[in-house]
Image: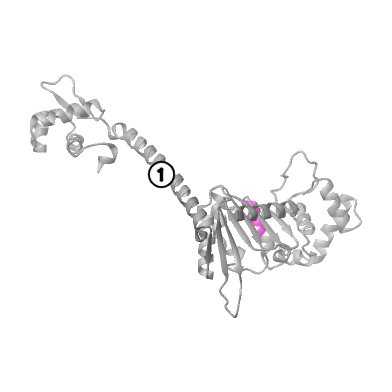
Amino acid sequence: MLEVAGLGELEERAYRLLVRAGEADVADLADELGVEQERTARALGSMCDTGLTREVPGTHGRRYAPVAPEVALGPRLVRQQETIDWARQAVEQLAEEYRASLRRRDADWLIEILPSRAALREQVRHLQNTAREEVMYFCRAGHVVMPSQDNTEELEALGRGVGYRVIYERALLEEPGMVANVAYGIKLGEQARAVRSLPVRMMIADRSAALVPLVQQAAGVTEPTAALVRGSSLLEALIALFESQWERATPIRFLEDGQVADPGDACPLDADELYLLSLLVAGVPEKTIASQLGLSLRTVQRRVYHLMRLAGAQTRMQLAWHAARERWL
């Protein structure tokens, strides 16, 4: 069992006996082990050299006692674990080189077709569970695999420090419950933006794989079809598409009271006002904002009028222009 720490079979047996007995001489230990005294003495000498045992001073004959296991074996296991980690990294590097070679020679390794909703859902879960750095999302209205509220993998990934950048289609923000759902994600660390419309649904994990639905329904077949795209020029194009949409999208802000994203900006708005303003600039109708936030339409309109007075604006367009100029969002 302790061979992973570098102990041979005889050394492990001798060490276990010493741990139970506290100390023993060569003759007694040889009898217990059932081996010759000379062989036992050599084993004990080797164990002393490697820090597993020590000679007991002030005794007649040579008696030995065990060194505490956490002292004797702990550093060995740490070194063994480091060796395993280095080997695992080498294997991962070789595996990536192998996959890259296959992708150059076989298109099936470049693009994998997912023919069902179950396969697509499994990949959505897998990519988020294995992400280490960042997940980028295009969220369009009308879910294909699951509602955004059911994406618990994002919450777990945010909890372990994975960054999320999500672009929401305006129509999606108008769906029941979405405003509160987006606000919750932002509180946990998600960076969210909104646009009028998105060209495609998409998820990119760690810039190494992208998931893109291809066909939602064809010839009466309700199962969606998607493509899993791995490292390639096509993947780079999808990443560039996301970045271009990200630059154009309107930030959705929901911060804790008393905090703003850039302390250098003299923003006069509190957290609720920032969130309301970001939804307005994203194009979400006041009626939808009211219903999703559990407010009356009159309350929302009163708060919008307050924002317009702060900005010195006469119209919603002037309010958006002033917010952009003053870097409120």
Q: Secondary structure at mark 1?
A: helix
Q: How is the image coloured?
A: one colour
- In the rendered view, would you say 253 is above or below 44? below
For the point 42% across and 42% down, the residue is: 90
In the depicted view, which residue is nearer to us: 242 or 106?
106
For the point 41% across and 45% down, the residue is: 91
- In the rendered view, would you say 215 is above or below 19? below
For the point 25% across and 40% down, the residue is: 3
Q: Is residue 78 magenta?
A: no
Which secondary structure type mostly characterizes the magenta part of the structure?
helix
User: Start and end of the magenta stretch?
Assistant: 181-187
Q: Residue furthest bottom?
A: 220
In the depicted view, which residue is nearer to us: 138 or 271?
138
For the N terminus, which image quadrant? top left
Circle count: 1
Q: Which residue is mark 1?
A: 88
Dot 1 surroundings within 10 Å: few (below 14), some, or many (20 or more)? Answer: few
Instruction: Indicate the position of residue 105 as horizontal and vertical percent values.
Output: 49, 55
Left-right relation of 137 to 94: right
Callout 1, which amino acid?
Arg
- In the rendered view, would you say 160 is above or below 11? below
Instruction: Indicate the position of residue 16 as horizontal and vertical percent values.
Output: 20, 38
In the depicted view, which residue is nearer to us: 55 or 270?
55
